Image (cartoon, rainbow, N blue to C red):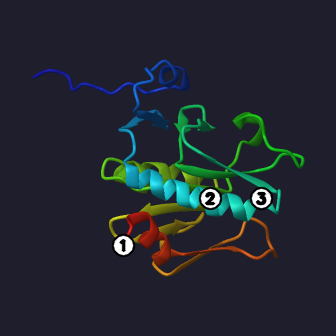
Amino acid sequence: MGMPATQPRWTAEMLRALPDDGKRYEIVRGELLVTPSPSWTHQGAVTFLLRVIANHLHARRVAEVRTAPADVELEADSIVQPDIFVVPRVEGRTPRRWADVGRLLLAVEILSPSSARADRIVKRGLYLAHDIAEYWIVDLDARFIERWRPGDERPEIITERLEWSDVPDVAPLVIEVQSFFAEVLED
């Protein structure tokens, strides 16, 4: 009987050497995650959420929203590309690079069949370990949003109204969840 094959522990350097072939390559604590290019509907959900989050943040000028592809390096062996993420401004200015920020206020992943394990288990563990204030998993098929916060053992399942505030004592962003799904899924 032969020895079992072991998977290499991936590093940032190894990840950056991979080809630009349309797939999304990420590593979480040395585990390589590979997902195909997102679907049209997936990108529609990203576009909708990006627009409403950007509009919400614009007047406040305390945080910035970005989308993948963008390497977010939370640990030396963990580089992820959240579909959407919010970072604080640095000394009142837009950060120029990830190293200037070092933390996320919000991470959002739009669930795909090929990313369910990575988004719900692997990335969630990483995000919550780094005290990211909120992590949303948008499930287009089930038509709900899972909201995770540090210390949560289970997500809050949101089907009606999602409220998120990036700044205390300021009116929150409100997303009518069913309207969001109706627009993105065109029904």
Q: Which residue is mark 2?
A: 51
- Relative horizontal placement of residue 95, taking residue 114 as reference (left or right): right
Which of the two residues, 145 or 181, is positioned nearer the viewer here?
181
Name, please, the residue furthest toward the front.
Answer: 186
Q: Compare marks 1 and 3 and give the one earlier in the sequence.
A: 3
Q: Residue at x 44, y 21 (%)?
A: 18
Query: Residue type at mark 1?
Result: Asp
Residue 58 got which mark? 3
Q: Is residue 8 above or below residue 28?
A: above
Name, please, the residue furthest toward the bottom.
Answer: 160
User: Which is in the foreground here, disc 1 or disc 3?
Assistant: 1
Residue 87 screen position, x and y as percent? 71, 50
Tell me the CA gap for discs 2 and 3. 10 Å
Q: Secondary structure at mark 3?
A: helix
Query: Residue type at mark 2?
Result: Arg
Residue 187 got which mark? 1
Query: Disc 1 vs disc 3: Cβ atoms closer than 8 Å?
Result: no
Q: Secondary structure at mark 1?
A: loop
Q: Residue at x 59, y 37 (%)?
A: 70
Residue 66 screen position, x and y as percent? 64, 47
Which of the two residues, 104 or 68, is positioned nearer the viewer here?
68
Query: Residue type at mark 3?
Result: His
Answer few, some or many: residues within 10 Å of disc 1's Cα (few below 14, many 20 plus, some between 14 and 19): few
Q: Is residue 112 above or below residue 164?
A: above
The N terminus, quarter of image: top left
State the image quarter where residue 134 is shown. bottom right
Q: Is residue 74 above or below residue 88?
A: above
Q: Compare marks 2 and 3 and give the one earlier in the sequence.
A: 2
Tell me the CA gap for discs 1 and 3. 30 Å
Query: Disc 2 vs disc 3: Cβ atoms closer than 8 Å?
Result: no
